Every structure is written in structure tokens, then in C-alpha cells.
Image: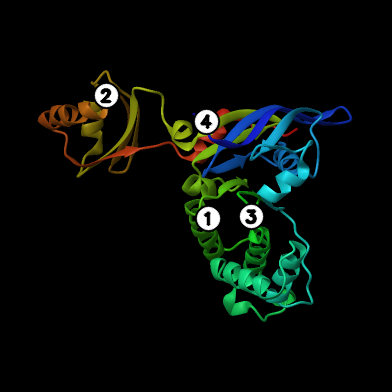
């Protein structure tokens, strides 16, 4: 049975004669990290703003934890934490003061507020900068602070718009680690990004949008999977790759063969159970294979395949 906590159902949003989002539908299951990708101008931020109750669809509906974004926006806001792609910060306060201010905004005061702020700073690794002015923080620390503020009311669903933009490699690694930790805590996370490599490592499911149209929504495994009944293999040979390549060319199940120094990459029409006999056969013909690997398409390759590079 579906355990969807976010349901986007046939949503359209137009600005005059321009359809930024056109009949988009997808679901995000409880505890998933859902990547939402597309080029700039594809409709990502418009969709996310509607999810966060900052805009309304012209048709269709969105529900978050059973609350409709139009009929019950307050219920949605209780369940959802939204981190926009561009956040203004109060520069002249210390980190702990900034967080305590927002804890008070959620009607948590005094000692409970201080305990909540301490807990969130521990989670987001802000303890060491607790007394620093916000104006002195690096880009990475500012992103941590905004994410910490987003977590203060313990939302069930997190919506993060381009959270890795502008971060250095260390900060991106930290962000990926935190996202996995939050998923382990039971959070459902929607993360918008154009940095495809970031999403491939953390997402359970993904949606691809182009010119306001959703061109794919489903699991990462299904997206990256090659056509059914076809495996992608890489063979490493000791020497004379061309000789092994010639052997492979005689095999009807082998296609799309490419030689890369001592590596041979190709598609094989069969199952994993067929591989031992396949290897035995080519070795008997003189192939000098030293290693074999299964390969999957990467996210960039799939993205280019299912989109046309068009921008609305």
C-alpha cells in the first residue's frame, strides 16, 4: 500500500500565457529522499513554492501529511520545513541568538528553547560557532544555520531548494551525511538540485522536470536500470584488448562494444546467472580477462537521455 506523505496531483501553474508547471503529478513516500531535478527555468522552484504554501496552483491539488495546501495551509506549515535557495539572515546576532529567536517564533521559550537550540546545534555541527556573529560565517556554515532553523519545529517533511549550491566539497560531503542521518530519523526529504552527482548518492526516488512537464518520477533504481534483460559489463584484460574484443564480436548477445585501453565495455543480453558460462566460453577462446564488473548508467547520462535540454 502507498504510504505517500506528499501528493502532487495534476498541478498546473501559469503566469499570464506562460505555463511554468503543466499537469505535474508525483508522490513522495514516507522516509524517502526525493530528488527533484531539471534545468533552470524548468518549473522546480515554482512547484516547491506551491508545496510550501507560498503559491497556489491554478488547477490540481497538493497534500502534505494529509493537509491540503489551499484548504489547510497552517497544517501543511506545521508538518513541513522549507529551506529556500536564497535566504536572508540576521547578520548582527550570534548563532545561538538567531536560533533561539526562531524557537520563540514557534512558541518555545526559556529553558525548553535553550535545550531545543542546543539539540539542533549538535545535530547540525554548529556548537563550535554558537557565539559567532552570523555575519562572520562562511557559506557552508550559513547553510547549516538555515537548515538548523528549518529543523526547529521538528517537521515531518523537509523541502530543500538547491541546498548544495555554492558549497565547497567538504560542505557537500557534510550535507549528504546529514541528509542520510535525517532520513534515518524518519524524515521525508524533497531536495531540488541541478548538481546531479549530489542526488545520485543520496536519493531513493527522483522526479525530472523540463519545460514545466514531469518527464520521469520513480525510484533511482528504476531510473538507472538498463533495459530489462540487458546487463552492462566491463572486462579488464591483461594485454591485447583487441584480441578479446574480436572474440566478443562473435557473440550474438554482445552489443555496443567499446575499447578503453585495457577495459572493454559492452551490453550483454542475459542475466547474472549466465555470466559464469559466458566467461568460461570466452576464456576457452583465448580471452585474457583479469576482472569483470557490472556497471550502471550514471544520473547525468540518463538525464541527457530523457530530456532534450529545453528551457521554458
Tell me the residue that label 2 is attached to. Answer: 249
Q: Which of pointers 2 and 3 lies earlier in the amino acid sequence?
A: 3
Q: Nearer the viewer, mark 2 or mark 1?
A: 1
Question: Which residue reaches farthest top?
Answer: 252
Tell me the residue that label 3 is attached to. Answer: 163
Q: Please give the name of the residue rendered at 64% of the width and 64% of the height, measured from the top-left corner.
A: 148
Badge 1 density bin: few <14, some 14–19, many ≥20, Cα 10 Å: some
Secondary structure state at the residue bearing disc 3: loop
Q: Which of pointers 1 and 3 lies earlier in the amino acid sequence?
A: 3
Q: Measure how far apart labels 2 and 3 are at the Cα level.
A: 47 Å
Q: Measure how far apart labels 4 and 1 are at the Cα level.
A: 21 Å
Secondary structure state at the residue bearing disc 1: helix
Q: Measure how far apart labels 4 and 3 are at the Cα level.
A: 28 Å
Tell me the residue that label 4 is attached to. Answer: 2
Pinpoint residue 157: horizontal percent, then vertical percent.
62, 47
Q: Relative to residue 82, is residue 262 drawn left or right? A: left
Badge 3 density bin: few <14, some 14–19, many ≥20, Cα 10 Å: many
Badge 2 density bin: few <14, some 14–19, many ≥20, Cα 10 Å: few
**Quarter assignment of residue 275:** top left
Q: Which of pointers 4 and 1 lies earlier in the amino acid sequence?
A: 4
Please state which of residues 308 and 296 is positioned toward the viewer in this rendering: 296
Q: Nearer the viewer, mark 2 or mark 3?
A: 3
Residue 212 position (above or below residue 178)? above
Label ID, residue 182: 1
Residue 73 position (above or below residue 253)? below
Amino acid at each position: 500500500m502507498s504510504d505517500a506523505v506528499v501528493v502532487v496531483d495534476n498541478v498546473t501553474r501559469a503566469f499570464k500565457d506562460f505555463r511554468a508547471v503543466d499537469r505535474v503529478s508525483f508522490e513522495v513516500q514516507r522516509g524517502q529522499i526525493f530528488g527533484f531535478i531539471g534545468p533552470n527555468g524548468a518549473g522546480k522552484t515554482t512547484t516547491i513554492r506551491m508545496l510550501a504554501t507560498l503559491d497556489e496552483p491554478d488547477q490540481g491539488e497538493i497534500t502534505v501529511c494529509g493537509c491540503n495546501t489551499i484548504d489547510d495551509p497552517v497544517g501543511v506549515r506545521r508538518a513541513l520545513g522549507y529551506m529556500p535557495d536564497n535566504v536572508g539572515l540576521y547578520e548582527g546576532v550570534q548563532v545561538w541568538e538567531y536560533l533561539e529567536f526562531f524557537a520563540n517564533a514557534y512558541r518555545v521559550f526559556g529553558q525548553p528553547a535553550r535545550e531545543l537550540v542546543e539539540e539542533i546545534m549538535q545535530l547540525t555541527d554548529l556548537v563550535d560557532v554558537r557565539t559567532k556573529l552570523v555575519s562572520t560565517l562562511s557559506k557552508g556554515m550559513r547553510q547549516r544555520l538555515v537548515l538548523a532553523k528549518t529543523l526547529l519545529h521538528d517537521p515531518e517533511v523537509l523541502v530543500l531548494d538547491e541546498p548544495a549550491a555554492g558549497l565547497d566539497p567538504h560542505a557537500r560531503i557534510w550535507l549528504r551525511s546529514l541528509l542520510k542521518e535525517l532520513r534515518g530519523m524518519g524524515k521525508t526529504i524533497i531536495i531540488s538540485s541541478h548538481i546531479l552527482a549530489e542526488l545520485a548518492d543520496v536519493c531513493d526516488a527522483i522526479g525530472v522536470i523540463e519545460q514545466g512537464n514531469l518527464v520521469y518520477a520513480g525510484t533511482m533504481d528504476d531510473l538507472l536500470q538498463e533495459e530489462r534483460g540487458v546487463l552492462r559489463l566491463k572486462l579488464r584484460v591483461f594485454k591485447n584488448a583487441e584480441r578479446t574484443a574480436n572474440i566478443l564480436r562473435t557473440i550474438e548477445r554482445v552489443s555496443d562494444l567499446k575499447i578503453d585501453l585495457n577495459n572493454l565495455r559492452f551490453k550483454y543480453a542475459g542475466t547474472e546467472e549466465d555470466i559464469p558460462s559466458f566467461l568460461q566460453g570466452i576464456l576457452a577462446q583465448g580471452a585474457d580477462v583479469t576482472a569483470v564488473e557490472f556497471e550502471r548508467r550514471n544520473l547525468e547520462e540518463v538525464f541527457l537521455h530523457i530530456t532534450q535540454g529545453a528551457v521554458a
